[in-house]
Structure formats: structure tokens, C-alpha cells
Image (spheres, rainbow, N blue to C red):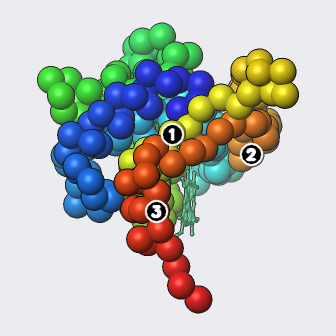
Amino acid sequence: MIRFPEVQRKAQAEIDRVLGGRLPEFNDQEDLPYISAIVKEVLRWQPIGPISVPRAASEEDIYRGYYIPKGAIMVPNSWSLLQDKEHYPEPHIFRPERFMKDGKLNPSVRDPVKIIFGYGRRSCPGTHIALSFLWLTAATLLKTFDLSKAVDENGNTIEPSMEFHAGVICEPAPFKCNIKPRSAEAKELIHSVEMTP
Ligand code: HEM
């Protein structure tokens, strides 16, 4: 959101139009398709698991002309599937709109969820809970806070480095930013859900 403020503005416009002055709930998902599109694009654009869990071939096989001996270890390249130009034109660009059509989610676009949570019968059993919480966290943050670039002591904007740690789990390197309540009303909403000990 810090790097792509126009996405943040569009998401907040959708949230304000649909929710008015209240916080999002799980059952708002259908009415907030752009938030769902952002979650899909976040999972696609910089996948947390660019390669998936290796598999061993239980039998020998031939796939697209390649001979695969029994016992061969195969490493799924999720990154390459998520960067496939045929499914995601200009794949290096962060563009949630690629998942939308006529104001709704477009079911004909390949869903990154089918890739990022692994494959087959050992795919992630936490998929639904992870997606629900990702969605609710994104919607709640965007409803209540403005995220923006930090400013240094001389008043210069600090651009986020956009560096990512390489590894089995790929996460962004630490970066400075501003996170501020959007309004006095947003502040009240935040305090209204504060946990009491
Ligand atoms: C964005 C969040 C998450 C991502 C991207 C993710 C991704 C993955 C991937 C790629 C695998 C390997 C699947 C395969 O072998 O094909 C996996 C396995 C697994 N995940 Fe997740 N996961 C997430 C959240 C969660 C959560 C919230 C839970 C639990 C509540 C969970 C529980 C598990 C378990 C138990 C396995 C091992 C399944 C098995 O080997 O049979 N995951 N996950």
C-alpha cells in the first residue's frame, strides 16, 4: 500500500462506500471484491513461498516428453506459475485489477490461491483460515489506517527498498513507513475493539 498509494485509495473508497462507519466482518467479503483482489495480487506478485514442498515420483512417468524415473525428487516452481505472462499479463506489475471484471472478481483468471498453498492431497490444510484472516486484516487496516512513505529528518521521502529476503520463505526486508489513523472516527473504531486484560 505504501508503494502503490493509488491501490490504497481505491480500496479505501470501496470500504467507505460499503461499510460506512463500521469495521469489516468476514461476511462482507462478497461486497468488497477489490480487497479480495488485493489479497490475491499480494500472494501472486511476491509469493511468500516461491518454491513449494518437493515431491518424489512414486512411479516412473513421462511428462511432456521428459522421462521421470521412480523416486526422482521434483520441486514445484510456484514463482514461475505466478509470473506466467499468459495468465498474468505484465506479471512484474502489482495490479489487483487483473482479478476484476465489471466490478466483480473475474473467475476466469487463474487463482493464485491454487498455487501458493501447495498442490494435491498434501496442500495446506490452513488455506481457508489463512485467507480469511489475511482478508480481514487487510480490510480492517485499510478501513482504519493510512499507510504512507516515511519522511527523514530533512523532510525527504524515504522510498521503501522493495528488497526481499531470498529463501524458502520470502519476506520483505525491514523498511520505514508511516501508519496513522485515518480520522478521529477511525481512532474511535480502533479503541472500540481494544482488548482489555
Ligand atoms: C499465507 C499463509 C500460508 C501459506 C502461504 C501456506 C502455504 C503452505 C504450503 C505451500 C504448504 C505445503 C503444501 C504442499 O506440500 O503441497 C503448507 C503446508 C501446511 N500448512 Fe500452510 N500455509 C499458510 C498458512 C497456514 C496456516 C494458518 C496453517 C494452520 C492453521 C497451516 C498449516 C499447514 C500444515 C499443517 C501443513 C502441512 C500439510 C501436510 O504436509 O499434509 N498453514 N502450507
Q: Judge whether residue 181 can be spotted in this image.
A: yes
Amino acid under disc 1: Asp
Report ligand 1 position as a quadrant.
Answer: bottom right
| First of labels 1, 3 by sequence position | 1
**From the viewer's perspective, is 106 left or right of 51?**
left
> Left of 36 or right of it: where is 173?
right
Task: Identify the residue position indicated by label 3 in the image.
Answer: 190
**Mark 1 and mark 3: Cα distance apart in space:** 13 Å
The label shown at residue 168 is: 2
Image quarter hosting the C terminus:
bottom right
Amino acid of disc 2:
Val
Instruction: Estimate the x, y position of residue 137 in percent, counting from the top left.
Output: 46, 55
**Residue 68 picture quarter:** top right
For the point 59% across and 32% down, the residue is 148
Q: Position of residue 47 (x, y in %)?
A: 59, 37
Can you identify the residue that label 1 sits on? 146
Counting from the top left corner in percent of width and height, residue 139 is at: 39, 49
* Crowd rating for badge 3 (residues with CA inside 10 Å; few <14, some 14–19, many 20+): some
In primary-sequence order, the first of circles 1 and 2 is 1
User: In this rendering, does residue 107 appear at all?
Assistant: no
Q: Which one is in front in this view, the residue at disc 1 or the one at disc 2? A: 1
Q: Distance from label 1 to label 2 (Cα)?
A: 31 Å
Residue 173's disc number: none
Of the image marks 2 and 3, the number of the one nearer the N terminus: 2
